[in-house]
Image (tube, rainbow, N blue to C red):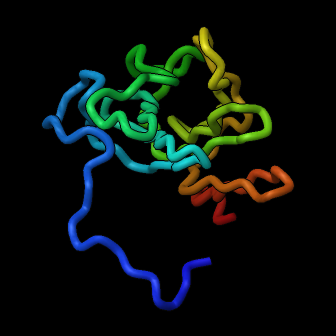
Amino acid sequence: NIPANATWAQNGVTVAGGHEYGDATNQLSYHFDLFVDDDQTVVIADLGNHRITQWKNGNTTNGQVVAGGNGAGKRLHQLNLPTDVLIDKETDSLIIYEGRRVVRWSRRSGTTKGETLIDNIDCYGVAMDEQRYLYVSDVGKHE
């Protein structure tokens, strides 16, 4: 809940990227969605680089690739134009929409591939409620 008398800083602060367009760990390329967890860690769907990057609170100079980053593709170690991302706290994993599928990718160290949850979907938006129900839209099926 945001108080009615809340105020914000007049100038924004860059918390990710800010080093021109590119594929280095301090750069982004056509990023779409972002999600901020309880620890102020930011995860970003970096569409142009076919990856999800993570930016820890306070470290705005270098992100960490936490999913994809192995070129565009349909294999489980690849992402293809990711546009949506959220964090499932219960399983410590990322839920990602990319390339007509929704995938889960563990945030645990050493994870090199994800698993497909939903295939053949034209999704614009993913969300998860407190009971961990996953909500997706399918614009191709108008549902």
Q: Is residue 63 left or right of residue 143?
A: left
Q: Residue 19 at x, y = what percent? A: 16, 35
Q: Residue 98 at x, y = what percent? A: 52, 37
Q: Give the vertical position of 43 relative to 33 (above or below).
A: above
What residue do we see at 38% from left, 80% from top? 7
Q: Residue 13 at x, y = what percent? A: 26, 55
Question: On the rendered image, what quadrant is the C terminus found in?
Answer: bottom right
What residue do we see at 23% from left, 73% from top? 10
Could you say which is closer to the camera, residue 33 or residue 98?
A: 33
Could you say which is closer to the camera, residue 135 or residue 56?
A: 56
What residue do we see at 72% from left, 54% from top? 128
Which image quadrant is residue 53 in?
Answer: top left
Hey, which residue is sitting farthest left in the picture?
Answer: 20
Q: Give the vertical position of 6 relative to 53 (above or below).
A: below
Q: Is residue 70 left or right of residue 143?
A: left
Q: Give the vertical position of 97 relative to 64 (above or below).
A: below
Could you say which is closer to the camera, residue 4 or residue 142?
A: 4
What residue do we see at 35% from left, 74% from top? 8
Question: On the rendered image, what quadrant is the N terminus found in?
Answer: bottom right
Hey, which residue is sitting farthest bottom in the picture?
Answer: 4
Hey, which residue is sitting farthest right in the picture?
Answer: 131
